[in-house]
Image: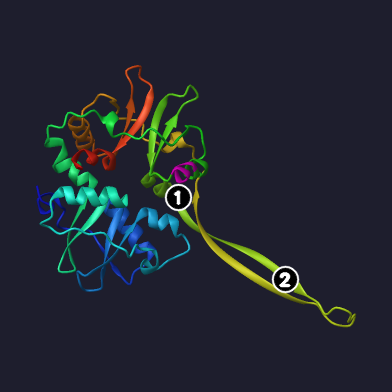
């Protein structure tokens, strides 16, 4: 199967010059987590911008200063395994499809799951691909603390547990962005310089104003935002069945439990596509 067989052709993209607000608005409107960036009035690919990029660079407004410039791409005639290998090697979940330096499509880990993997008779259990180091937090944790927990793990998902340690919900990076807003904070730094030994001289004061942007959350707790209608698989669920569940529910991660019903892992689209890797 080739990249062109499953790629998205009508790709939502953004142009440079452009700003943060443009990117955020388009991502929310189209419900996407990343956008290829093209040169104004052309289809020439110059970068890619994701929600993670926006979070990591709260002080930057211009897309050109936020986007990733070192772009990994594939050709429409590449095998989907080539796309999988690049996703795994560079730890990315979307790859622009380029022909003659122009953007012609986009292939994501979800595309591979939804349009290819679920049709394949891959019986390997998800326990072979799941991650065991899962970011978890108490369901009563304030959102700002929960966000820091997710960032500490370097993942885009967070599992919520109740006081008994049972799984009750799941949050994604998208949920946090929807609940947060970029605010500017100003701090004042004073430095005084006097003339030593001259009692008649005036002290001169330099005032430095520093403005820094950050993502601020409401007073909501994790349980107020987390999705509670959970799709769960067991360690023995096949790749094919898990892929089909992801496709049907339009989700990108699924908690994994063992035969005793205990939470033991998490499997994401970027984990499952490893089943196609040589």
Residue 198: x and y in percent read: 88, 82
Q: Earlier in the sequence, mark 1 or mark 2?
A: 1
Residue 4: x and y in percent read: 11, 54
Q: Quadrant of residue 256?
A: top left
Name the secondary structure under disc 1: strand
Which residues, given as a range, are shown in magenta? 149-153
Q: Quadrant of the C terminus?
A: top left
Magenta span contains residue 32: no
Residue that appears at 23% across and 26% down: 237
Q: Quadrant of residue 201?
A: bottom right
Residue 162: x and y in percent read: 47, 26
Residue 2 left/right relative to 260: left
Spatial CA span between label 1 and label 2: 34 Å
Of residue 30 and residue 105, the one placed in the foreground of this image is 105
Residue 257 left/right relative to 77: right
Determine crowd level at label 1: few under 14, some 14-19, many 20+ residues with C-alpha closer than 10 A: some
Q: Please give the label number shown on residue 26.
A: none
Name the secondary structure under disc 2: strand
Q: Which residue is mark 1?
A: 180
> What is the magenta segment's predominant secondary structure?
helix
Of residue 196 and residue 173, the one placed in the foreground of this image is 196
Residue 128: x and y in percent read: 28, 31
Q: Which residue is mark 2?
A: 191
Determine crowd level at label 2: few under 14, some 14-19, many 20+ residues with C-alpha closer than 10 A: few
Residue that appears at 40% across and 67% down: 65
């Amino acid at each position: 199967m080739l990249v062109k067989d499953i790629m998205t052709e009508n790709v939502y993209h953004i142009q440079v010059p452009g700003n943060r607000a443009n990117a955020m608005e388009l991502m929310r409107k189209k419900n996407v987590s990343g956008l290829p960036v093209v040169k104004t009035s052309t289809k020439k690919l110059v970068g890619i911008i994701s929600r993670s990029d926006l979070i990591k660079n709260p002080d930057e407004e211009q897309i050109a200063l936020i986007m990733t410039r070192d772009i990994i791409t594939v050709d429409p005639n590449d095998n989907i395994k080539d796309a999988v290998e690049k996703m795994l090697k560079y730890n990315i979940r979307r790859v622009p499809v380029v022909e003659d330096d122009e953007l012609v499509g986009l292939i994501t880990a979800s595309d591979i799951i939804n349009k290819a993997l679920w049709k394949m008779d891959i019986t390997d259990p998800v326990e072979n691909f799941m991650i065991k180091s899962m970011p978890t937090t108490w369901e009563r944790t304030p959102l700002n603390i929960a966000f820091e927990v997710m960032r500490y793990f370097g993942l885009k998902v967070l599992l919520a547990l109740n006081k008994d340690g049972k799984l009750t919900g799941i949050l994604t990076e998208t949920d946090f962005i929807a609940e947060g807003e970029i605010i500017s904070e100003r701090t004042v730094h004073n430095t005084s310089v006097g003339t030593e030994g001259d009692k008649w001289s005036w002290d001169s004061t330099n005032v430095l104003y520093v403005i820094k942007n950050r993502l601020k959350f409401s007073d909501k707790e994790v349980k107020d935002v987390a999705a509670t209608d959970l799709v769960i698989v067991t360690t023995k669920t096949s790749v094919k069945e898990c892929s089909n569940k992801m496709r049907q529910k339009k989700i990108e991660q699924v908690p994994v439990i063992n035969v005793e019903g205990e939470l033991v892992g998490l499997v994401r689209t970027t984990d499952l596509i490893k089943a196609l890797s040589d």
